[in-house]
Amino acid sequence: MCKCWMAWGTFTGWIETSRVFIMGRDLTYITIPKASLSDEQQGELRALLNQKLGHSL
């Protein structure tokens, strides 16, 4: 498992595809594979991203 410590304010937005969540940060991106998350965890991540970064692009 990888741990990452970045302030939410450093991210510029996020999108969701059928296979991954993508969080944007200037010209770099962080991908989170959906296969690594249960349906419940995906819902929790989606809610957290909406809360911290706003609606998906």
Image (tube, rainbow, N blue to C red):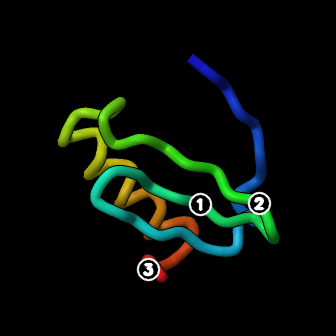
Pick whichever, 19 or 43, lies toward us.
Answer: 19
In the picture provided, is 7 more to the left or to the right than 20? Answer: right
Q: Which residue is mark 2?
A: 28
Image coordinates of residue 17 in percent, x first then y, are 35, 63
Question: Residue 55: which disc?
Answer: 3
Position of residue 27 relative to residue 7, above or below, is below
Q: Earlier in the sequence, mark 1 or mark 2?
A: 1
Q: Secondary structure at mark 3?
A: loop
What residue do we see at 26% from left, 52% from top?
Answer: 43
Amino acid carrying mark 2 in the image: Thr
Q: Nearer the viewer, mark 1 or mark 3?
A: 1
Query: In the figure, 40 relative to 56: above or below?
Result: above
Identified by mark 1, the residue type is Met
Q: Nearer the viewer, mark 2 or mark 3?
A: 2
Residue linked to disc 1: 23
The alpha-carbon separation of the residues under discs 2 and 3 comes to 19 Å
* Nearer mark to the viewer, of 1 and 2: 2
